Image: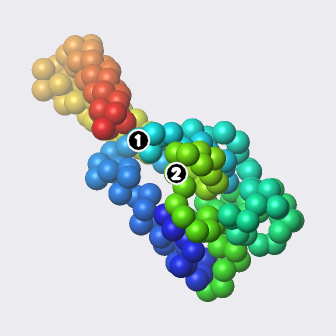
Amino acid sequence: MDVRALRSDQILFAELRSHYCPMRGRWTWLSLKQLTRIQFVQFELHKNGLVDIRKTNDLPPENRDDYLYCPIPAEAIPPVGENILMHLYDHPEEADDDAFCLDRVPKKLRERLTCSQRIGRGVNFSEGLNIKKICIFGLLGLFLSAAFGMAWSIKRDDVQGGFGVAAFVLAAMTFITGMLQVTLETK
């Protein structure tokens, strides 16, 4: 993403969202993962656009003239903390109209990074488990299997059989959810 033409933090974080969300796919509401960290990184570009993170919380050296960021030298590493990056990513409308964060982001000047140059700087989006969603899916499965077990027990006057089948249904739902996650992650 070219950030050189951007003029404010609001636009920066809105652009970050508009680039990141489509990469996750259209079934993200089913995913048990969420964005957990945004970090400044040094990366190595390989053929076919593959990227390898080399260092985290890294900025270009002060004497490099192919990147621009302010202030030089940076007052702190990282130049913007992960908490504020995550908050403004989640709520871009709360970002300032000025370029406080944008000025601190290293911007590649001149040409786009190529495989011959190899080393670049940028931000990395890290995902982790969405504990809230996992708990909601787990409780939903628990309530559905309990309701099934009670309905079976009342209808057939068989508590043990009803909750035996309910336990199987809960285990099957857990397995199917895991399979769906693997399928969504590999696409």
Q: Nearer the viewer, residue 47 or 30?
A: 47
Question: Dot 2 surroundings within 10 Å: few (below 14), some, or many (20 or more)?
Answer: some
- Residue 47 vertical position relative to residue 159 in the rendered view, above or below: below
Q: Which residue is pictured at 62% across the width and 51% down the height?
A: 120
Disc 2 designates what residue? 114
Q: Secondary structure at mark 1?
A: helix
On-image quarter of the C terminus: top left
Q: Position of residue 22 (x, y in %)?
A: 35, 57
- Residue 29 vertical position relative to residue 164 in the rendered view, above or below: below
Left or right: 114 with respect to 147?
Answer: right
Give the Cα separation between the discs numbered 1 and 2.
11 Å
Q: Nearer the viewer, residue 146 or 10?
A: 10
Residue 77, by quadrant, is: bottom right
Q: Nearer the viewer, residue 83 or 71?
A: 71
Q: Position of residue 16 (x, y in %)?
A: 50, 65
Q: Secondary structure at mark 2?
A: loop
Q: Amino acid at mark 2?
A: Thr
Q: Amino acid at mark 1?
A: Asn
Residue 48's mark? 1
Q: Which residue is pictured at 51% across the width and 68% down the height?
A: 2
Left or right: 159 with respect to 43?
Answer: left
Q: Which residue is pictured at 53% across the width and 79% down the height?
A: 5
Q: Position of residue 88 (x, y in %)?
A: 60, 68
Q: Position of residue 165 (x, y in %)?
A: 23, 18
- Residue 163 vertical position relative to residue 119 in the rendered view, above or below: above
Q: Which residue is pictured at 80% across the width and 56% down the height?
A: 61
Nearer the N terminus, badge 1 or badge 2? 1
Which residue sits furthest bottom? Answer: 97
